[in-house]
Each structure stands twice: as structure tokens, then as C-alpha cells.
Image: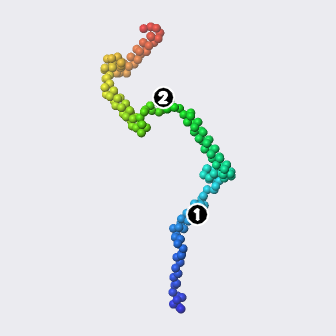
Amino acid sequence: MADETTREVTIDETPISPVRPSNHIRQNSLEKHLQHRPDPQELKNRHILLDTNAAPALQAAAAELERQRATDSLKKGLEKRPQREDLVERNILPSTHAAPAIVGQQRELEKHMRADSLNEKIAHRPDREALIKEGILTEEPVSSEEADRLYEERIEDEYAKREGGA
């Protein structure tokens, strides 16, 4: 008997139920979420829950009326919408008859063609001497003194024209 009392008795304390500790964590998580759950009035204010003060038949009628009002508003907006021709005339819509899938590619092509045309014109533009010879440009003085003298001459000529002289 003395041997039995001094010897420690090992007792199996594992639970018999199939509940695992991980399920307790999940259950605790659910409890935490339920504690922070918004109250019904807050959900009604955020239009998540319907206001249940009215009878269900009235709620359905109110929802249908609201839907009909939105439909009527959209129909009025569509009736006031300008026709496609007006939008093309005001350059809001492109005047193209291409398929919508290739409209973007068509715009890119037009843009590149315009850039090529401008580059071609810039490459073949006449030089300054040719423009002066044709009278399109006037020869501008190089020094600032010459520019001041030419400016004063032009001002005097302009005054003379306005006064009736020259």
C-alpha cells in the first residue's frame, strides 16, 4: 500500500468529445464578430435592411413605386438625349462608319498619317532666302541698333499714313 500512495497516478484528461481546439478558436471568432454586429436600426439607415414598420404588402408596393419612378426618370432622360447626327455635327462623336472594335485603331492610323504629312511638309519647306525672294518674309536686321532704326522708321511711316501725309 505504501508503494501505491507514493506512486503518482497518471490520469488521462483528454476530452472525449470530438471538439478540437481549432474549433474553439473558430467559435471564439464567431462570438467576437457577433459582439461587433451592427444593430438593426443602423442596418436600416444604411439601406441594408428594409424598414419593417410597414406591412409587407405596402413595402412591396413602395419598392415597385420607387422602381417605376426610376424607370420613368431614365425614359425622360433618354428622350431628351440628342440624336447621333447632332453629336457628330458638334464633334462629340466621331463621324465614322467603322465597326466600334476598330475605331481606336482608325484614330491611331489617322493620327500617324497626319504626323507623316506634317513631317513631309516640314522636310520640304523652303528656306529663308527663298521666302525673302518671294516677298513672304522681309529681311530683318541682325544688330539691335539696326532693329531700333528700322522700328523708328516704321513708326514714323505709320504716323504719316494716319495723318494723311506720305
Q: Which residue is mark 2?
A: 89
Q: Does the image show residue 71?
A: yes
Disc 1 secondary structure class: helix
- Earlier along the polypeptide chain: callout 2 or callout 1? 1
Task: Single out the mark in the foreground, 2 or 1.
Answer: 2
3D distance between C-alphas at marks 2 and 1: 64 Å
- Count of residue discs: 2
In the rendered view, does 40 fall on the left or right side of 4? Answer: right
As shown in the figure, which amino acid type bears the numbered disc 1? Answer: Glu
In the rendered view, does 159 fall on the left or right side of 133? Answer: right
Q: Position of residue 60 (x, y in %)?
A: 64, 49
Whether residue 115 is situated above or below residue 51 in the rendered picture: above
- Quarter-of-image position of residue 139: top left
Q: Which mark is residue 52?
A: none
Q: Which residue is mark 1?
A: 31
Q: Residue at x 34, y 16 (%)?
A: 135
Q: Position of residue 55 (x, y in %)?
A: 68, 51
Q: Residue at x 60, y 59 (%)?
A: 36
Q: Quadrant of the C terminus?
A: top left
